[in-house]
Amino acid sequence: MFPVKELKRSALISLWFAFLTFPILVVKVDPLERIVQWRWSNMFYIAIGSFVLSILAKVYMIRKERRDARKKETAATEPFAQRIIREPRFLYPLAIACLIFGVSFPFLFSVYQTNIMTTALMYVVLGLGLNIVVGVAGLLDLGYVAFYAVGAYSYALLNLHFDLGFWLVLPLGGLLAAFLGILLGFPVLRLRGDYLAIVTLGFGEIIRLILENWSEFSQGPSGIANIPRPGLFGIDISFGGGITYIYYLVLLLVIFTIFVVNRLQNSRLGRAWLALREDEIACQAMGIDKTKTKLIAFSLGAFWAGLVGVIFAAKTTFVNPASFTFLESAIILSIVVLGGMGSIVGVIIGALILILLPEYLRALSEYRMLAFGAVLVIMMVFKPNGIVSTVRRSYRFKGHAEIEGDSHE
Amino acid sequence: MDYFIELFFSGLTRGSIYALIALGYTMVYGIIGLINFAHGEIYMIGAFTAFIVATVLSIYGFPLLAIVVIAGVAAAVWSSAYGVTIERLAYRPLRQAPRLAPLISAIGMSIFLQNYVLLAQTSDFIRFPELIPEFAFMEPVAHIVGSSDMVILVTTAIVMIGLTCLIKYTKIGKAMRATAQDKTMAVLVGINVDRVISATFVIGSALAAIGGMLIASHIGQINFYIGFIAGIKAFTAAVLGGIGSIPGAVLGSMILGLTESFATGYVSSDYEDVFAFSLLVLILIFKPSGLLGKAEIQKV
Amino acid sequence: MNDAPVILSVEGLSKNFGGIQAIDSVDLDIRKGEIVALIGPNGAGKTTFFNCLTGIYTPSSGDVYLSNPESGKKTRLNGKKPNKITEIGMARTFQNIRLFPTMSALENVMIGRHCRTNALILGAIFRGPATRREEEGIVDSSYQLLKKVGLHKQVNEQARNLSYGAQRRLEIGRALATEPFLLLLDEPAAGMNPKETEALVALIRQICEEGHSILLIEHDMKLVMSLSDRIVVMDYGKKIAQGTPEEVRSNPAVIKAYLGEDVDA
Amino acid sequence: MQSGLTKKLLVAAVSLSFAMAIPVAGMAGDTIKLGVAGAQSGDLASYGLPTVKAAELVVAQYNAKGGINGKKVELLIEDDVCKPEVATNTATKLVTDGVHVVLGHICSGATKAALPIYKEAGVVVMSPSATAVDLTKSGDYSNFFRTIAPDDAQAEAMVNFAIGKIGAKKIAVIHDKGDYGKGLATIAKGMIEAGGKAEVTLFEGVTPGAVDYSAIVQKIRRSNADAVLFGGYHPEASKIVSMMKKKRMKIAFISDDGVKDDTFIKVAGDKAEGVYASGPNDNSTNPLAIAAIAAHKKAYGEDPGAFFENAYSAALALLNAIEKAGSTDQAAIIKALQTESVDTPVGNIHFDAQGDAVGVGFVMYQVQNGKYVVVK
């Protein structure tokens, strides 16, 4: 069933990889003892591995081509996930099931699982926040973590110096981050695409470096410890209870965020953001104030990062600048892109995958991050549009039942 | 005055290294419009390959000059091989994909390569052999400009001139320029775009590998993580100069290197990176396409 | 006709790009209710002229004034942002269609309503009665506009899936949604077949009768001659002639500019 | 088609819940669970992995003897990447898995974030490398111990040495902007200024990973310092030291425990010659240390990495305390740690009320002929 030509191709690929990985994977030297270690077995594994993988990839491609061909013959079918989201008949029960699952989670699983899930849900909110900026408004922001840091440090510092409580700082942290978003947005939002990306990256680094170096202000790299967990009407909660409590808090925030983002997307503002993403010139020509609309998106995204930042500080009870590196921004961005730009469901799935994956990959111990990197590449190569694409709302009008084009791709 | 000259040369050394890496960023960006986040890792792999080859050769008793040449060539060859493979695996399938997909793929590649070297070699820092000897004639000024600084500056200059000639006068250089300007047209006039893109990755990776070997020899140590920071800085430099522009990448790198050096010397090294990134933000506010980048005239 | 108020007045407008004079002191008045056509060979600077009027380019010298025919308020447009100019009451379409490709036809028109509506973040989140009414109004009026341009059967179709002619009509609908008193059309008939062009002429007439003034760039001379009240001819950035279709048709300068091209076609 | 979709949904839901449920299944059995937490991947992995190896060696040794009071010792190894937010997950995981004592975490920041969780769960924690002063002296963490001396003790040793032995009058204090390095440097700066015998001519941080340090080295020269006090780890130290040599500077370079590591000599090579570093008391003649290093070489084929001896000692101390206490109860273990002395590679130690090891002090070393030797 498999042509000889392909076998030959796979053999060539495996030779290439054997060559490619030769110095790094096979040779290990100790310059002091002057010993060279030749690990030929590694080359053998690589050769076999790449041979098998290339065959598998080829088989997959052939199958995919066949499937695509068949698809063209029959009517275009939507992907499975897409269909669920489009059909209220499936979406609502599914949403309710998810909600029930979410609410009962701490009862079903251990404290550790709850804690991990809390982290994942925090990233859901972060992803949804960044989604407004990147996915909806099309502004590539590589320094999103700066606003997250602002939120976290707002709570840590305001609590340290002025003894302000969690509930007071929660909105305050969000607002501070949003304010900073506006402050930064003014000068840089006229930059285009990748230039904006690098400036926001630089900005994120500047914030982190200031937190690291300005010790008088932020206590520097040693960070701020003993940040109180959020209180519940003055009741002191035990450790396990505390985790459950924060879990529900974050779950509430997730629901709130979904609600708000969903409403925003189908509003005058949301349409303006989408239009901005698709064509800036046409957008302006239609009377949309580019700067103002971008600023709103940017600061609104920042607001969410600030909120989650405050919760982060309260959950971890400790903040230091090491938590707010570029890698963090990259992961949040990956959540948005991997899930499907602009899609709420996509972002949720993306966050769950990317945050839970490394946790459950712990079994792989040192191969964990290797696998993580590989998964990112593979997911993008096979699903470049993300797991779920955006679904725009369709409108119906009385007396025009015969409206064409109700089905989206 | 001595102090100024010292800082100036230290800035130039830094700038040269940034330039060698930044060129790869800028060339790839110019051709396929992708921020190749894994480029810093190519630089790291170049340094590691040079380390391994140089050590093996020195154990087998080769003379220093042979070691330098062979290690340099090996680093360039393998880095290029990695560059081409990455392009083939992680970027080429995504050429028609939305703009951000290859970016995420690049970030994933970067994480993968870091951990690949970490697992295959070591998590620790290792000593890089001194491939650049201390020249006797440099001794009088050694406290200001070291031999390795000199070698780095000279090598970078030679490489820049070579690259400029390559792009200006050779067939592949012309094909690269054509592809960068208009990919569809390039296909129409019979340029094999895939091959041009591969060539870009080869050249960019080889430059990064040479940079990796030089800097590793200059500071005497490497580990799997060195590519990340150098990569970000070089990328910043490329954008500063106007991404896509080759002289821009060099200019941006030099300005960035000098800024960092003078910021450390006259203000505080605490904030050297803050200065670097602030400079970037400032320049982009006043020149939104970087120093030598072409200002895009919107076609409406 | 000639005593109708001037709504657009351009005085000595020039634009140069680093030494190249794209537009060279062009004057132009448009009165209420007029359909004016801007013609000229390729590269004459017509689209650049449009871009200067709509704020996408800033003119190098000269002035552009727009007067609201109702209130009579006169505004200088130089240096104003495109969105401000649209808000004042001048909207445009593009030579190479610039719709929002993945948004539906209806949503494209709804975007046009942006500058005539107000809801912001809080409105969107809480969706109070005022916002809901506004949103219903947007949907309703956008639907009516789609009907006007004949696209009411493709309400939910993504813009990129529409036919070429439909896309051009959608752009007109989108521009109308901003409630302009002056509409700028950049080659509205390009790429259309005769039947589509005919429908377009009817549509433009209808729009004009509803009180919008129109300035259009077009190469289809038949359309230009049958539709325009006045024609302005540009060549090498300069205005070389203007007048009624008959006057322009017999102007030797125009014939020279179009050398070899069949003006009467 | 509809029913097909519903079915698919159901299958997806079921398989999802299974997937989530699998990791929950805890390991049963009557063992003593020793958790090991620290950076095992990422840029700081080289500081965390030696601890894992130390724990593996100690546990293998205990289990070979038949365990503790008849119970086998089981290792639970968890990565925290030295990040506080990951450390809380790591700690929660260990607690959920029923850990009895924890060896870790590696970085002070991650330790601070994780400690409240262990404290609530009644788990004793012992770090081989977290030196932040407030970990013990703030009194916030009653369950925390360490086999390494805190930063202030170390800073004192460094400053006394610089002023007393070297006779430095002008000192440039440099750090790596990190948690450990900057903390240490700040304390040292305070001590120098309070002592009044010398002045701090320069106090600055270098950027780890920067491609070139010549500017900062020039600045040190310009400050006319007669000694450099460096707080941080060996990669930066070796870069600064080699740059100083290249710039023909001959002033004393005094650093800390993060540099008193054989890796430093390996990386810096002959440039390391003459560098001073503070480190735990000399254990090179300690038979336990010799045995531990030999065991490491035998098991892993290479020399141990950073904090190996401290980690080895911490593992011994923890298991010994459990053995002596005869239980895994927190209070009993703490009592045993404070009262029972134990022989370890870092000496015969027990712990004070705050959690610092008694018997672990600092002495100064110098690199001579490619080896660290104690400066008398």
Image (cartoon, rainbow, N blue to C red):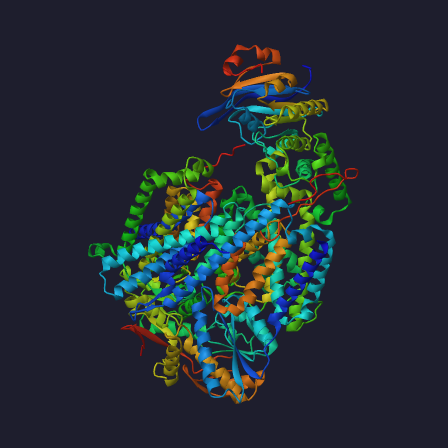
Q: Choose between D364 and D321: the one closer to the eye.
A: D321
Task: Name the residue located 38 percent from the left edge and 46 percent from the top edge.
Answer: B199
Is residue C102 shown left or right of residue B177?
right
Residue B98: x percent and y percent?
54, 46
Residue B43 appears in which quarter of the rendering?
bottom left
Residue B37: x percent and y percent?
46, 52
Residue C54 appears in which quarter of the rendering?
top right
Residue B151: x percent and y percent?
27, 52
View extreme (left): residue:
B137
Residue A65: x percent and y percent?
55, 49
Report if residue D176 is visible in the image: no
Report if residue A157 is visible in the image: yes
Quarter of the figure that contains the N terminus of chain C: top right
Q: Is residue C94 above or below residue A353?
A: above
Is residue C161 shown left or right of residue B112?
right
Q: Choose between A112 and B61: the one closer to the eye.
A: B61
Is residue B87 shown left or right of residue A332?
left
